[in-house]
Amino acid sequence: MAAFVKVVEANGFSAAAPQLGLTPSAVSKLVTRLEERLGVRLFNRTTRKLALTEAGENFYRDAARIIGEVDEVEAAIGRRGHEARGLVKVTTSLAFGAHQILPLVPEFLDNHPGIELDLSFTDRVVDLVQEGFDVAFRIGHLADSSFVARKIGEDRRVVVAAPSYLRKHGEPKHPDELVRHNCLGFRDRTSMNRWPFLVDGATREVMVRGNCRGDDGDMLYQLAVEGVGIVRLTRLTVARAVRAGGLVEILQPFTPRDTIPIQAVYPHRRLLPPKVTALVDFLTTKFDPPPWEDESSPSLSPQAGRGSG
């Protein structure tokens, strides 16, 4: 049963074999024997693809639950009286990692000298199981329901620009005026270039355009700080620059107050190992309430302009 669950989670016999300490053929034989014992086919096998049958899907749900409960019992026993220690592999977005995770790393490591962090900040889609990550921190709603998530905070998106840009081009007072401004957008995630606003009690989307696009939010953030254009990003990304006067929040009366969750995501265990629990608990205390909402955006002023460079 454990071999079957591992094959499903690793998406193949070859990927599951090293995790089980067996050869792919040995893993295949274990699954075949399980099918024979159950009297049902669990996988549809082809030379290129391995897919669960309906019986396989049903069996996986129950088997994964049982194995998870056994893991929980073993982890709980092993955790008692033991300090959280070991390597924690973490992945998150470039912006969240750079602006919120990194500043907290020294304090966390000081508090937990037995823990080491392996950090990966990227905006690409990461396979947590295949790449061996213990936890991912994601902004937004979880697309893959097979993962387990714990909310550690929330955020919202705001529209900002550097004081230098606003002095040169003027500050838009209404969303309709954005068509006359240089707005920084995403190169691939074009849906993010439709900016929602509340106008006369209804949501209105503005398709923005500009002379520069980028792959990730942190890149657009840097361009905005340099005065290249207006950008819409998460508050946690821009908060430090807003407080320092390097960016100014604009169009606030029209900005939706909808929040998006920040979640700790891990592949399949409901009970995290102590080393991961320590990190998730630490960040939860730091992000609830959200520190990026501590201060309101400063108004455009000579003092605010000093931080724009």
Image (cartoon, helix red, strand yellow):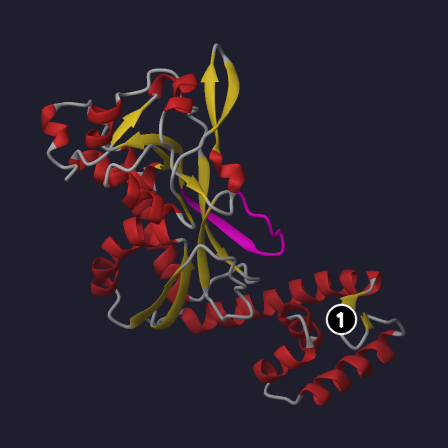
Q: Say which quarter of the image contains residue 73.
A: bottom right
Which stretch is magenta? 141-153
Q: Looking at numbered disc 1 in the image, what kind of residue is underneath it?
A: Lys
Q: Position of residue 217 (x, y in %)?
A: 38, 46
Looking at the picture, tell me which residue is in the foreground, 261 or 231: 231
For residue 175, say whether it is visible: yes
Q: Position of residue 105 (x, y in %)?
A: 25, 59
Disc 1 element: loop
User: In the figure, is residue 54 to the left or right of 124?
Assistant: right
Looking at the picture, tell me which residue is in the foreground, 99 or 303: 303
User: In the figure, is residue 294 to the left or right of 77?
Assistant: left
Residue shown at 62% from the left, 78% from the top: 15
Q: Position of residue 19 (x, y in %)?
A: 57, 81
Q: Position of residue 277 (x, y in %)?
A: 40, 60
Residue shown at 55% from the left, 70% from the top: 130
In reply to whether residue 150 is colored magenta, the answer given is: yes
- Marker count (numbered): 1
Q: Say which quarter of the image contains residue 103.
A: bottom left
Q: What residue would you read off at disc 1?
A: 49
Bin the neighbour count of mark 1 within 10 Å (Cα to Cα): few under 14, some 14-19, many 20 and up.
few
- The quadrant in which the N terminus is found is bottom right
In the current view of this chain or complex, which residue is farthest to the top? 200
User: In the figure, is residue 195 to the left or right of 309?
Assistant: right
